[in-house]
Amino acid sequence: MKLHSLLFASTVLFRSILAAPSPAKGPGHAFNQHGKPQGPQVTIGNKYFYEAGGTLELSHYDVRYYQGQPVSYEERTDSLHHLVRAYLTTFRERNIETWIAHGTLLGWWWNGRVMPWDWDLDTQVSASTLTWLGENLNMTVHNYTAVASDGSESQRQYLLDINPNHVDRQYGNGLNVIDARWVDVRNGLFIDITGLSETRPTQQPGVWSCKNFHRYNTRDLYPLRETMFEGVPALVPYAFDKVLTDEYSQNALKKTFHEGHRWIPEEKEWIPEPNGHER
Amino acid sequence: MHEASYNENLDENSETEQSIPASSSDRIRILDLPAKHIPKTGNHGESGRLIIVGDVHGMQHELNALLDKVQFNEQRDHLILAGDMIAKGPDSLGVVDLAIKLGASAVRGNHEHRIIVAHTAMSVNNGLFKVPPPGDEFQRGKYYSDGGTSSHRDSKDRALATLLGEERIQWLQNSPIILRIGKLGDMGEVVVVHAGLEPGVKLQEQDSYMAMNMRTISKNGEPSDGHVGEAWIKTWNDYQKNLPRNERMTVIYGHDSKRGLQREPYSIGIDTGCVKGGHLTAVIIEGGESGYQLSLVQTDCQEGRSK
């Protein structure tokens, strides 16, 4: 889903911004005088979202909020759990239709949770919802109270950022296949939000696709199913098995060892293998 | 905590649509037909018959005509609808009402399932979503709060769910995905399912989406809802023939009107495209002197789809 074709030069350029104590004033991404975060000043067609680095690991942080070092396994798990809960809850409270996709949908299929080796999350919306988001909620910050397992509460903030290139529904140069992001402003971890539309309504009615060429039939997506993800209400595509096997093959729904984690059926959880290798 | 609430949901049959993750999404609703409906063999002048009809698709007039033709006896006979009784045709409500009135059994087809899922989604938050003003690729439809689509997405499903109303939906929701009739002589265990079953997989472990949607099975044994590969009944019948006689199973199903009437030793496909102006088919199972007799009766149908 993601492109890691980031130029080294831009990584260096943005380092200077990151050095500031908070996601602060800089030529690229800044807060305005009211403290409202601004999107990057880009011309349409250039890459909009920048990740913290070209390595696989650093590509999972939004550069504006990257704190200079990757988060730990535990912090990531906690961040992604609350990231997606906040997203789903916020969208539901505002009656905005969204559903979970790609690797995140696979995680849902296994146990209704983020897979522990996942770095970022994927959701989808219809192109019309994306337009609505761009006009009504772009660059808004959302407060959320995270409750830890011991009952302690902490306040978190998430930025909803819509890529202005979303109006162009084509793949183009491939730098703008992600339409929007929901970013944890504490560390830059994010959800990629992609809009789906009928790109060829007359030639191929009922076929939806995102800019990155993932294609779906209307009847496989709708009616969306009510379910739970990470403990909060969520929606998934109607024919989720089909969507998953088309993208990942049957094997992804059977394989019980992934990325150093083993599926424990009794606990319905992925547990890290001590030596990280398949037995 | 979410796991726990999910398991509770599973126990209430009507909530399986909330379906979900994993392993549990494979959980499939199976019901046994009450023994009183099973035809008796031997000298039972009074024994009733099973009348199994597939893919009525709202063609109530045709269903009535077929029941007349088989001289359906409300007291003794039992009607089983093999799914897709609603949608496409003119009178989905009438068909469900008739089924309820006759005390019929039914299995869920892909159309019932869609409606149930749409209904579940609508009952949460009223199912209303903010979408943008007209001018985008969608037309406005009245089943979204401020827009949506009439030709795309699930407006049609939502419209039919609204029309059917709570009581009929509840009845549809109570119908299983697999109805187990029981052992009937040479046919072995007889089951009714809307689309198909994967051979060699226990009933409890069948995939519910495939049970309502499958058409083919690929060379490497994966079921598909498309038209590519061989009809699932080929693999199914080959498999049954290699089983000991007392372990064989016969499936009565609908769903595939392109193939039409399909009579194989261990499967009977009865979607004969009534709503497209084809036929409506009934399988009649009755008890004879020493075994069970099976017959087929058809009526002609008018084209039922609105243009």
Image: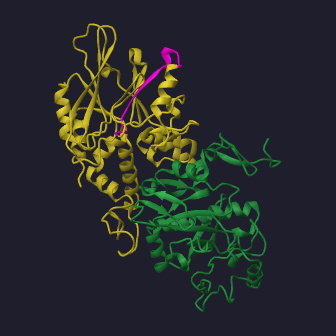
Residue B288 in sight here: yes
Q: Quadrant of residue A103?
A: bottom right
Q: In the rendered picture, chain B carries what hue?
A: yellow
Name the quadrant of the C terminus of chain A. Answer: top right
Q: How is the image coloured?
A: by chain
At 48% from the left edge and 15% from the top edge, which residue is drawn?
B246
- Magenta-colored span: B242-257
Q: Is residue B58 magenta?
A: no
Up-down: is A14 above or below B36? below
> Is A120 or A72 nearer to us in this picture?
A120
Instruction: Tell me where residue A154 appears, x and y as whole percent.
Output: 64, 69
Left-right relation of B46 to B6: left
Instruction: Tell me where residue A225 appears, x and y as whole percent.
Output: 45, 53
At 59% from the left edge and 63% from the top edge, which residue is drawn?
A122
Residue A88 in sight here: no
- Which chain is displayed in green in the rendered image? A
Up-down: is B110 above or below A204? above
Left-right relation of B38 to A250: left
At 53% from the left edge and 19% from the top edge, which residue is drawn?
B242
Up-down: is B3 above or below A74? above
Instruction: Tell me where residue B52 appears, x and y as whole percent.
Output: 30, 29
Name the quadrant of the N terminus of chain A. Answer: bottom right
> Is A179 or A211 nearer to us in this picture?
A211
Left-right relation of B195 to B306: right
